[in-house]
């Protein structure tokens, strides 16, 4: 029997180093260069960022989700989860450690399905941290439902290239990416599960037109990083096809399974940061005759937040352990969906309570809580809406059950009581006889 909730000492030393390093060296970047983590480095930022990345590499913590053949350590999802809890506190930390979304998921599918030429052209600079990428899937009308997608790619008459036409929406980081991974319909005459493909498209390909960049609530016009893209007769060669024609759904499951659990890992760190701030405030603020920490309502906030975060963390770690054990996202689909479904609520609730404990200061732009609340809303939609994930969980859970044989439930007490009485009838008769 092996139930162990301890981290091996050597890796714990690395986690302790990462925790100190992120607090001292990386979190300040969020304040001096906010919203620039996915922007190509200029000379000033490079002079700061590159040495920090080098420190991470020397510690063996660069791109730890990837195997040694791709420049990582192959630590697996469980160790990555423990590291991401630390990185989740900072916008810049995933960049410094080479494990930022969406690039981690994009790198994973190129590593799995890419040709040697594709890996050399797209994967290598991505792993080196020199370029950014964009996963261009969602559409204005179809949303996140691929069965409704209209963007298509048809073979050109030359027989060696494809022509892509259509619109994609909320393609994050497209404006600063070097290439896009585009999911399109290539055979409308079969099921979408067999008729869709993915293409690797350089962002500067003629016909790739970013019509606008949408910002999140609270961001100024022009600050947005989520693009509406018009693919207008975009010509790409056969060599741009990723994983083979009709393979988009299989590839998407590989990418989105990892992406969802990685979001959850980082959310743990962000929610913990909100809880830390709540507790500090409770111990620092004196009002109505006592500390906030002595008020039952605030104690309830802290207790609920601690329990909620601990439950979520254990679910995430167990799911990461399952991924490492089975090495197949399909076998862990239920728990990945469950993690994704509860994640927005956990972050929202803890951030909201922390904001409330901070009073008027909590709702200002001098504290990060409303940004966290907005982030929770985004997490409820990114990589599929919460409602879809709940449906997935329910369907997977119901597979282990069957309907009752008749009108009465299996645990209908009158029938169970009669069965129990029949089972022990001789002893019950003795009791009656001894009266």
Image (cartoon, grey):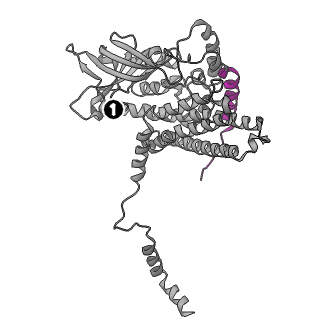
The answer to whether 134 is drawn above or below residue 293 in the figure is: above
Provide the secondary structure element on which disc 1 rests. Answer: helix
Quarter the C terminus occupies: bottom right
Can residue 145 be found in the magenta stretch?
A: no
Residue at (65, 30) in percent of width and height: 362
Q: Please name the residue that numbered disc 1 is placed on.
A: 146
In the rendered image, residue 433, in percent from the top left (x then y), is placed at 54, 93
Residue at (28, 23) in percent of width and height: 152
Instruction: Report the magenta residues as a range.
Output: 1-27
Please give left or right for residue 163 compared with residue 181 in the image.
left
Q: Please name whichever residue, 214 or 260, is drawn nearer the observer in this view of the structure.
A: 214
Q: Residue furthest right?
A: 289
Residue at (33, 21) in percent of width and height: 167
The quarter holding residue 188 reads top left
The quarter holding residue 75 reads top right
The quarter holding residue 6 reads top right
In the rendered image, residue 239, in percent from the top left (x then y), is placed at 32, 17
In the rendered image, residue 246, in percent from the top left (x then y), is placed at 29, 29
């Amino acid at each position: 029997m092996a139930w162990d909730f301890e981290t091996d000492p050597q890796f714990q030393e690395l986690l302790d180093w990462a925790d100190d390093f992120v607090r001292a060296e990386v979190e300040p970047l969020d304040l001096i260069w906010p919203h620039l983590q996915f922007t190509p480095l200029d000379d000033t930022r490079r002079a700061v960022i590159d040495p920090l990345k080098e420190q991470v590499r020397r510690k063996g913590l660069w791109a730890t989700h990837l195997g040694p053949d791709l420049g990582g350590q192959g630590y697996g999802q469980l160790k990555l989860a423990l590291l991401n809890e630390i990185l989740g506190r900072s916008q810049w930390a995933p960049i410094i450690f080479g494990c930022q979304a969406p690039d981690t998921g994009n790198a994973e599918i190129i590593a799995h399905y890419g040709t040697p030429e594709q890996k050399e052209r797209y994967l290598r600079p991505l792993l080196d941290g020199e370029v950014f990428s964009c996963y261009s899937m969602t559409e204005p009308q179809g949303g996140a439902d691929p069965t409704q997608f209209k963007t298509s790619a048809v073979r050109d008459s030359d027989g060696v290239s494809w022509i892509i036409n259509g619109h994609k929406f909320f393609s994050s980081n497209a404006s600063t990416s070097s290439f896009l991974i585009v999911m399109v319909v290539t055979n409308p005459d079969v099921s979408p599960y067999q008729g869709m493909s993915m293409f690797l498209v350089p962002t500067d390909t003629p016909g790739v037109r970013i019509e606008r960049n949408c910002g999140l609530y609270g961001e100024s016009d022009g600050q947005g990083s989520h693009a509406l893209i018009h693919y207008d007769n975009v010509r790409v060669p056969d060599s741009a096809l990723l994983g083979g024609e009709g393979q988009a759904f299989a590839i998407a499951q590989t990418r989105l399974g990892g992406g969802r659990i990685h979001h959850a890992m980082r959310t743990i760190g962000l929610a913990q940061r909100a809880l830390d701030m709540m507790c500090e405030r409770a111990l620092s603020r004196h009002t109505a005759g006592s500390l906030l920490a002595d008020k039952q309502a605030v104690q309830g906030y802290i207790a609920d937040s601690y329990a909620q975060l601990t439950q979520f963390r254990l679910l995430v770690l167990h799911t990461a352990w399952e991924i490492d054990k089975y090495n197949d996202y399909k076998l862990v689909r239920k728990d990945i969906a469950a993690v994704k479904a509860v994640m927005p609520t956990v972050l929202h609730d803890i951030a909201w309570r922390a904001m409330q404990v901070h009073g008027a200061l909590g709702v200002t732009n001098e504290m990060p809580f409303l940004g966290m609340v907005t982030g929770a809303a985004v997490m409820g939609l990114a990589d599929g809406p919460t409602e879809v994930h709940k449906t997935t969980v329910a369907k997977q859970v119901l597979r282990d059950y069957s309907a009752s044989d008749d009108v009465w439930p299996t645990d209908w007490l009158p029938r169970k009581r009669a069965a129990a009485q029949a089972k022990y009838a001789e002893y019950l008769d003795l009791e009656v006889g001894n009266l």
